[in-house]
């Protein structure tokens, strides 16, 4: 199953709901009451995410986060020539997903 399929699967839907529930159905960043999206902080455990691997975000925060990360990543790549030691969560939707 590829990532796009996984995001449509009942397993992920259930897991994503649990993440939103854990946060009281609020965006983990701005506290908006419509955390419609669930962000992966890491893809290390894709398919069997742990409790801290995902965060519920509203569409606005999610889009902004990925746009920022995209910029950081490009900047880093320009300076160092590789992504190997990028110090934080730098996998991007362009690499993997929209979530
Ligand atoms: Zn938000
Ligand atoms: Zn995300």
Image (tube, rainbow, N blue to C red):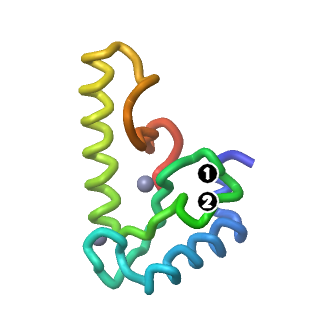
Up the image or down, 26 lies above or below 43; here it is below
Dot 2 falls on a residue whose secondary structure is helix
Closest to the observer: 55 or 13? 55
- In the rendered structure, the answer to whether residue 55 lies left or right of residue 33 reads right
Q: Quadrant of residue 68?
A: top left
Up the image or down, 74 lies above or below 9; here it is above
Q: Quadrant of residue 72?
A: top left
- In the rendered structure, the answer to whether residue 23 lies left or right of residue 52 reads left
**Label 1, on which residue?**
4
Q: Position of residue 12 (x, y in %)?
A: 65, 66
* Gap between marks 2 and 1 measured at Cα: 5 Å
Q: Residues within 10 Å of mark 1 (few under 14, many from 20)?
A: few
Dot 1 falls on a residue whose secondary structure is helix
- In the rendered structure, the answer to whether residue 51 lies left or right of residue 94 reads right
- The image's mark for residue 31 is none
Q: Quadrant of residue 57?
A: bottom left
**Label 2, on which residue?**
7
* Quadrant hosting ligand 2: bottom left
- In the rendered structure, the answer to whether residue 48 lies left or right of residue 54 reads right
Up the image or down, 2 lies above or below 18; here it is above
Would you say the residues marked 2 and 1 are in contact, meaning their CB atoms lie under 8 Å apart? yes
């Amino acid at each position: 199953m590829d990532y796009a399929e996984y995001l449509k699967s009942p397993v992920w839907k259930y897991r994503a709901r649990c993440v939103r529930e854990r946060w009281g159905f609020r965006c983990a960043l701005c506290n908006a009451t419509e955390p419609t999206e669930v962000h992966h902080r890491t893809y290390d455990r894709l398919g069997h995410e742990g409790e801290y691997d995902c965060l519920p975000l509203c569409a606005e925060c999610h889009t902004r986060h990925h746009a920022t990360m995209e910029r950081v990543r490009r900047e880093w790549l320009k300076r160092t020539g590789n992504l190997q030691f990028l110090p934080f969560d730098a996998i991007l939707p362009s690499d993997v997903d929209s979530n």
